[in-house]
Amino acid sequence: MSNVLIVSGHPRTGDDSVANKTILEELVVLLPDAEIDHLDELYPNYTFDVEAEQAKLAAADVIVLQYPLWWYGWPSLLQKWVEDVFVRGFSHGSRGTALHGKKLVVSVTTGAGESYYSAQPGGFDRFLAPAMATSALVGLEYVGSLPLYGVSYANRTDEAARADMVERSREHAKRLAEFVSTP
């Protein structure tokens, strides 16, 4: 298997997530050689060790961005990470080739169901525009997205809904592990 880096962009995975937390816990087991970068744990104040993050990206063959879709984009923690880490001379510009040819996979959770996103002009991919545009700019090969729809925070207090969310998150992690393990 390739060197896989999973970047968790949820700003409160430990206390505010069911789906993303479950997915990441499952990936530890399913992809034991992958490096999982919990941005919320490493950088709770949004001050990144840029050199360390760039070294992780440079060593990876496959980069997975794992995050919840918030207000139709990625969370501020992930946005700030991209702004600080993907800098000219590293990821782009005439000498910024560190990410060229690496694969990018976007694994995203949503509160709304699939029917909501498919009814929008441009479909679900429209909401992944920041990841796709970033990928194109920095020479990453965007190989696709794996959305997990309908895992709303509103369902966390309903036991049956929460159990369903956990099960679907485990299944999502299995699909993701298979996707990144396929050459």
Image (spheres, rainbow, N blue to C red):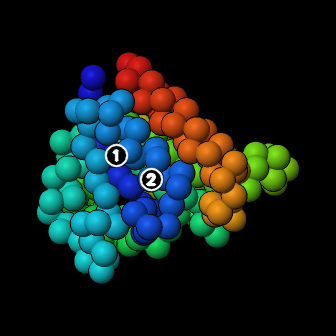
Q: Secondary structure at mark 1?
A: strand
Question: Residue 156 lies in what quarter of the image?
Answer: bottom right
Q: Is residue 5 visible?
A: yes
Q: Residue at x 24, y 49 (%)?
A: 57
Q: Which residue is mark 1?
A: 6
Type of amino acid under label 2: Lys
Relative height, residue 53 to residue 43 (above, below): above
Q: Residue at x 42, y 62 (%)?
A: 13
x and y percentages locating residue 100 in the rendered image: 30, 42
Q: Residues within 10 Å of mark 1 (few under 14, many from 20)?
A: many
Q: Secondary structure at mark 2?
A: helix
Relative height, residue 46 to residue 142 (above, below): below
The C terminus lies in which quarter of the figure? top left
Q: Is residue 77 left or right of residue 17?
A: left
User: Depth check: 90 or 143 in front?
Assistant: 143
Type of amino acid under label 1: Ile
x and y percentages locating residue 182 in the rendered image: 41, 20
Q: Is residue 97 visible?
A: no
Q: Residues within 10 Å of mark 2 (few under 14, many from 20)?
A: some
The N terminus lies in which quarter of the figure? top left
- The residue lying furthest to the right in this view is 119
Q: Residue at x 85, y 50 (%)?
A: 119
Q: Which of the two labelled residues, at mark 2 and mark 1, occupies the earlier sequence position?
A: 1
Q: Which residue is mark 2?
A: 21
Q: Residue at x 25, y 77 (%)?
A: 47
